[in-house]
Image: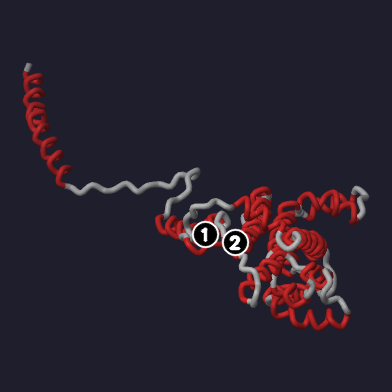
């Protein structure tokens, strides 16, 4: 009995004190500042940045506003361009009439300019892409004397703008009798130092040396190895180079300006500039509505090409950026 009573007597003070301790603990927890839990970034979710979002919005407006103005202005007549706001439609919707008149004006010369541009792009940009593939593959996978010198020349050529070489090219082509011919535009377009450098870097990362050695051990020639083994692996880089050279040739203005005199060989850029210059000549037709509509028709093929080849273009740019 005594042991039981002593045990109960000693345990009762603790039991009595426990509510007060819990109350003081609760009061202290109320007064203490709470620590904010840091947000952990989940691996599958992209990080959010207000600054980057604002910058992206500014660049989006910078890109889309001229395109929206071009589309809206192409729906106006010559009078509507002068009497309406630039970023809103006029009372008369004349898009289809402008397109029809663009293709039929001056005996359909716009169609000839469009075909000339396709010719320059097909032979110039296509040839530049093919040469860049061959040169980039050879520089990436073969060793030969003077390789470093070639690298220095390529880097130096990338740094030189094309306009700086236009006048020397014109003097050289004039002595060869090639001015005012399509070859004066096609031959200079075959050289693309940036495309060569891009294919060089891409082929270095995209084609394993072990794969080439295995093909050679199986008895495949270098030509067969290139076309059956290496070329499929270079597809993203090929599309990327092709897009860059196509855009550069399609938008080329200064080289045709100094090389061509015959309007029948003009590309779209030079032809539309000739239409635009008519307003500054005495007795010339003012056809700003056709110039704007022709400009809209000129960029449509480039937009379609980028949309169709976007996935190859993005994968080509990202190749080699991550090292496994």
Give residue 157's quadrant in the image.
bottom right
Farthest residue, direction front: 283
Q: Quadrant of the N terminus?
A: top left
Visible residue check, residue 63: no
Q: Position of residue 71 (x, y in %)?
A: 56, 55
Tell me which label, 1 or 2, sits earlier in the chain.
1
| Between 98 and 206, the one nearer to me in the picture | 98
Q: What kind of element bears circle 2?
A: helix
In the figure, is residue 29 to the left or right of 186? left
Which one is nearer the viewer's eye here, 126 or 17? 126
Q: Residue at (12%, 41%) from the top-left corner?
A: 27
Q: Which of the 4 image quarters holds residue 123? A: bottom right
Q: Nearer the viewer, residue 12 or 321?
A: 321
Q: Would residue 88 be found to the left or right of residue 255 on screen?
A: left
Front in this rendered view, residue 55 or 84 = 84
Other-residue count near label 1 (Cα within 10 Å), few / some / many at <14 / 14–19 / ≥20: some
Residue receiving disc 2? 289
Residue under the image location 52 percent in, 59 percent down: 80
Which residue is situated farthest in the top direction here? 1
Q: CA distance from mark 1 to mark 2?
A: 9 Å
Label 2 CA crowd tier, 10 Å (few <14, some 14–19, many 20+): many
Residue on which disc 1 sits? 80
Q: Which scheme is used to colour this image of the protein?
A: secondary structure
Q: Are marks 1 and 2 in contact (CB under 8 Å)?
A: yes
Q: Quadrant of residue 7?
A: top left
Q: Position of residue 47 (x, y in %)?
A: 45, 50
Q: Seen in the image, is 305 located left or right of residue 128? A: left
Q: Position of residue 286 (x, y in %)?
A: 61, 68
- The residue lying at 71 percent from left, 52 percent from top is 236
Question: Looking at the image, can residue 226 be seen?
Answer: yes
Q: Position of residue 53 (x, y in %)?
A: 44, 55
């Amino acid at each position: 009995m005594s042991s039981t009573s002593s045990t109960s007597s000693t345990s009762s003070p603790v039991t009595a004190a426990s509510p007060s301790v819990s109350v003081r603990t609760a009061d202290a927890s109320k007064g203490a500042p709470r620590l904010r839990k840091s947000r952990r970034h989940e691996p599958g979710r992209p990080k959010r940045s207000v600054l980057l979002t604002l910058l992206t919005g500014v660049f989006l407006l910078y890109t889309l506003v001229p395109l929206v103005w071009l589309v809206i202005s192409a729906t106006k007549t010559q009078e509507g361009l002068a009497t309406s706001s630039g970023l809103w439609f006029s009372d008369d919707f004349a898009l289809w009439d402008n397109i029809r008149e663009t293709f039929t004006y001056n005996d359909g010369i716009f169609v000839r300019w469009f075909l000339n541009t396709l010719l320059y792009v097909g032979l110039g940009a296509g040839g530049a892409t093919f040469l860049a593939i061959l040169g980039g593959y050879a520089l990436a996978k073969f060793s030969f004397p003077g390789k470093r010198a070639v690298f220095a020349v390529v880097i130096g050529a990338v740094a030189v703008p094309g306009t700086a070489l236009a006048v020397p090219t014109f003097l050289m082509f004039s002595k060869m009798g090639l001015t005012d011919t399509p070859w004066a535009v096609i031959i200079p377009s075959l050289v693309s130092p940036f495309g060569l450098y891009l294919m060089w870097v891409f082929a270095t990362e995209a084609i394993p040396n072990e794969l080439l050695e295995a093909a050679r051990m199986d008895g495949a020639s270098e030509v067969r190895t290139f076309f059956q083994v290496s070329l499929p692996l270079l597809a993203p880089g090929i599309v990327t180079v092709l897009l860059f050279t196509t855009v550069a040739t399609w938008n080329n203005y200064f080289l045709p300006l100094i090389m061509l005199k015959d309007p029948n060989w003009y590309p779209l850029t030079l032809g539309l500039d000739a239409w635009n210059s008519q307003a500054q000549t005495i007795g010339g037709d003012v056809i700003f509505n056709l110039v704007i509509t022709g400009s809209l028709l000129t960029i449509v093929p480039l937009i379609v090409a980028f949309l169709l080849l976007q996935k190859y273009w993005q994968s080509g740019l990202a190749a080699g950026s991550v090292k496994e």
